[in-house]
Amino acid sequence: PLPATVKESQVQEYDVCIVGAGLSGAVIAERYASQLNQTVVIVEKRNHIGGNCYDYIDEETGIRVSQYGAHLFHTNYERVWNYVHLFSKWTKYEHEVVGLVNGSYVP
């Protein structure tokens, strides 16, 4: 039975329920919907999607801020790179770690 505060007309049925709209949840939901033609509902406790990868534009400065700290996305697969470009513009970034060993810089 439905709770007293829920009317029958408010109830919707979905093929799939995804818990969490972070990176994995969002991708799985999109794949179910676009590739398998399934209806999907996502349940998320935060007030935004993207999980820890969430960022926003600061209204005062106009600067993009990573809410939970900087994140690097890396892949060696062109199909993955092409997939993420379907949803947002990405800026290529090369990360290089160099150490100082006995007076010489080494990768």
Image (cartoon, grey):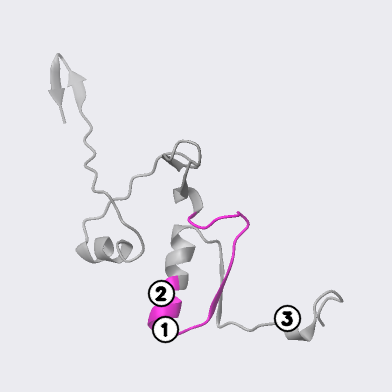
Q: Nearer the viewer, mark 3 or mark 1?
A: 3
Q: Nearer the viewer, mark 3 or mark 2?
A: 3
The question of residue 40 being in magenta is answered with: yes
State the separation of the CA atoms marked 3 and 2: 26 Å
Front residue of this view, candidates 49 and 101: 49
What residue is rendered at 45% in x and 79% in y? 33
Q: Which residue is mark 1?
A: 36
For the N terminus, the image quarter is bottom right
User: What's the residue type where badge 3 is placed?
Assistant: Gln
What residue is rendered at 52% in x and 58% in y? 49
What residue is rendered at 22% in x and 61% in y? 77
Q: Which residue is mark 3?
A: 10
Q: Is residue 42 left or right of residue 64?
A: right
Q: Is residue 79 left or right of residue 52?
A: left
Pick whichever of labels 3 and 1 is earlier in the sequence: 3
The location of residue 11, given as percent across then percent down, is: 71, 82
Q: Which range is magenta? A: 30-50
Q: Is residue 94 above or below residue 45?
A: above
The question of residue 83 being in magenta is answered with: no
For the C terminus, the image quarter is top left
Q: Secondary structure at mark 1?
A: helix
Pick whichever of labels 3 and 2 is earlier in the sequence: 3
State the separation of the CA atoms marked 3 and 1: 25 Å
Question: Residue 31: which numbered mark, if any?
Answer: 2
